[in-house]
Image: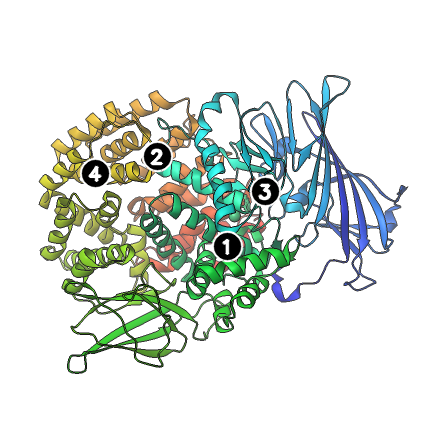
Amino acid sequence: PKVIYRKEYQVPAFLLERTELTFELFEDHAVVTSQLHLRRNPEADSGAALELNGQELELLEIAIDGRELAPDEYHRDDELLTIARAPAQCVLRCRTRIHPQDNTSLEGLYKSRTMFCTQCEAEGFRKITYFPDRPDVMSVFDVTIEADQALYPVLLSNGNPAPPEALANGRHRVRWHDPHPKPAYLFALVAGDLHYVEDRFRTCGGRDVTLRIYVEEKDLDKCAHAMDSLIQSMRWDEETYGREYDLDIFNIVAVDDFNMGAMENKGLNIFNSSCVLCRPDITTDAGFERVQAIVAHEYFHNWSGNRVTCRDWFQLSLKEGFTVFRDAEFSADMGSRTVKRIEDVSLLRTAQFAEDAGPMAHPVRPDSFIEISNFYTVTIYEKGAEVVRMIHTLLGPDLFRQGSDLYFERHDGQAVTCEEFVRAMEDASGVDLSQFRLWYSQAGTPRLVASGHYDAGAARYTLTLRQSCPATPGQPHKEPMTIPVALGLLGTAGNLPLRLADDQPGGETADNTHRVLELSREEQSFCFEGVMEAPVPALLRGFSAPVTLEYDYSTADLCALMSREADGFVRWDASQQLALRVLSDTQGQLAADSAVVVEPQFLEALGALLADPDLDPAMVAEMLRLPAEGYLAELAAGQGGADVDIIHQARQMLRSTIASAHADLFADCYQRLVTSAPFAPTAEQIGARSLRNMCLDYLALDGAEGLQLAQSQFDTATNMTDRLAALQAIAQHGPDQQRDAALARFYADWEQETLVVNQWLQVQAAMPVADALERVRALLAHPAFDIRNPNKVRSLIGAFSNANPVNFHRADGEGYRLLADIIEQLDSRNPQIAARLLTPLTKWRNYRGRGEQMRAQLQRLAAMPTVSRDVYEVLDKALA
Ligand code: HT7
Ligand code: ZN
């Protein structure tokens, strides 16, 4: 397969003034007629040919300005239709036949259960008809849909509809007009027997917008939270970014078979049903939060992505990084800001840092790709959002807002690059971001090493920061970057006032106990004066930069930060560093077969958290959560390779020690948080449930009494958060009989609710029991599983290979074989999902004693007779 390079970008030869599309939908095929109003691009080479992308299309007719083209007037291969001598201005008419019913890749036009739907990002439109399928070709769309009225009473596309028309033979027709020019990837069509929930929103400009969520009739009572979230998002984007919605109607449709979470098609967002439907009895708190965040994310794309879009797919983070930053700030404003930050940083550290350290490492703005679908990554999304967050930190909120205003105003209706975003930020603020741009071009996670020196006589504290960045594929050498380091200095009675020696950079802030230092050289020292005692530095407050940090804290320092530091993120991070230290000791003791001794200060610190009813329960829960086994494996990978069994044993042992040391405190805390308040997904209630269920998990780990409590919570729970937490506690820690009875009962109760059944699959896939793999193999044949549905594949296979390390890495290699078996089956039907599933195997270099078995499965896949471009690219990089 061909590698595509960013540096080879060329402007399109033709521009599109208008696109007219007619879809005739039938039970075994669809006919698509297009009329493309084309005009030669004055900026392109005047002799350049007209190129239209097209894949798996049956061409029925092609004509220019009403004249059918002779076969020698165009050239066609598997991917492209080329017309060498198209007039400078013309209307190209094309008719193609496609087979949505047989489209298992879930890109282009396909059928999900009984409905037709589309997924065109990134390059799916070319599976619908011949088209310049690139984001810098934008046009107004007029879409006509014709289908059987009884089977498909609802026919939707982008923009605003005209009244429906009845046709002969029980068919009907609806026309849609979208006045906003858009690239093909934002096109959408839905046809089905759908029902809707409706609300209204009056914009800041006084326009009334109709809001609808379309679902199957049985799901009508699961839309309220998504609708509330949409209204909150619309209001927030007006207040925070001055962005107003721009059509009369905003539709959301829930679809069961979907490769990702959702899609921001203009005026017609299509959602994976797992990201829109919720109800307290079937959805956990995490599910409620996910729906709110994804509804917001897709809505925010209306400006960051749709009104201003990407010039080419190398610029993907322009819309995704910025929009993730926007949705994260929205979620922080709607719930607990610190907990949201902790969750995001945990994801970044476990998944993105791992990506940056592995064979798929790429910059936020990649230089090349084979298959763009492989680049919807944590680096593009999450690291991209961190890059925008750093600009926000460096500029401050007011200048950042002026920068975003300028960006939207200057580029409205355009397809632009990351460079344009940074330039707007610079132009509005006057801040020079030249060096900062390296964050877009350099891959890898920078390493920050900090050391401090206190001179009591001079009352001076000197902090020295040193940065480096490891080599990544294709980038052996890295330049120093601009790293904003937010910090405070902790003294015995709280945070100390900060005064930097004259001439030292580090923005003044309203709060004199907080500074943002700008590290720009490889090594720099910062001098604080008037420091009356030896401080503990609270570094990277709020995780001000996506870097690893090393500072030689003593255990007492970490305990001080945990209990007294003003910044919630640093308090949590100290608890994690302490836990990592204790886990590392435990692993060493286990490996040496010596007695395990747990650092008493760590146990004491956790006890103090549990005993203090004034602390925020959500924060306490996060501080009691030990780092995940996958993260521990990533850390061990850099130190000679991970031993999954020792990691698992150490973590289990530490959890058991904590559970028995604080059994009474866990029980008291659990009881303290019992409430009779009716369920609401508020930050306060979510925090209380989170800590209560964390206590339950430790109690169930500690023995029969706790398991009894879990059983009673399972039997009496009135919401899915509590019910699933109890099931998980029983599944993870209970005896076989109790576990199997609870699992059977859960399935019997929720068999009819697909999204709940998916949770049931996930719980079983992640159980650290000896026969987990055999259970997963058996579940593949269970009626609850369906390999055609990505949610089910993720719930069973994704959870097994990512959340069950001891079983996935079984010594006999059967875990790896299972994953490769599934990928082999999936690759020809859904390459995007197949390629995503491969990730855990690509880490073969990280595992001591297992790497060769993992690599053997990659080689087996590489030897398949046909390999999709998606899977080929991942295998190629992983085996390089
Ligand atoms: N922008 C959307 C990306 C997306 C996608 C990409 C590849 C294959 C399937 C897909 N479904 C949606 C999602 C988003 O970031 O909002
Ligand atoms: Zn997005």
Rendered location of residue 453, percent (x, y) = 21, 78
Q: CA distance from mark 3 to mark 1?
A: 25 Å
Q: Amino acid at mark 1?
A: Phe
- Say whether disc 1 or disc 4 marks the residue closer to the N-terminus: 1
Task: Judge from the rendering whether residue 623 lies leftward or rightward of residue 358; answer left or right.
Answer: left
Taking the image in four quarters, ligand 1 sits in the one at top right
Q: CA distance from mark 1 to mark 4?
A: 37 Å
Closer mark to the observer between disc 3 and disc 4: 3
Q: Which mark is residue 697?
A: 4
Q: CA distance from mark 3 to mark 2?
A: 31 Å
Q: Which mark is residue 205?
A: 3
Q: Secondary structure at mark 2?
A: loop
Q: Quadrant of residue 155?
A: top right
Q: Secondary structure at mark 1?
A: helix
| Residue 515 visible in rendering | yes
Closer mark to the observer between disc 3 and disc 1: 3
Q: Amino acid at mark 4?
A: Asp
* Residue at mark 1: 322
Q: Secondary structure at mark 3?
A: loop
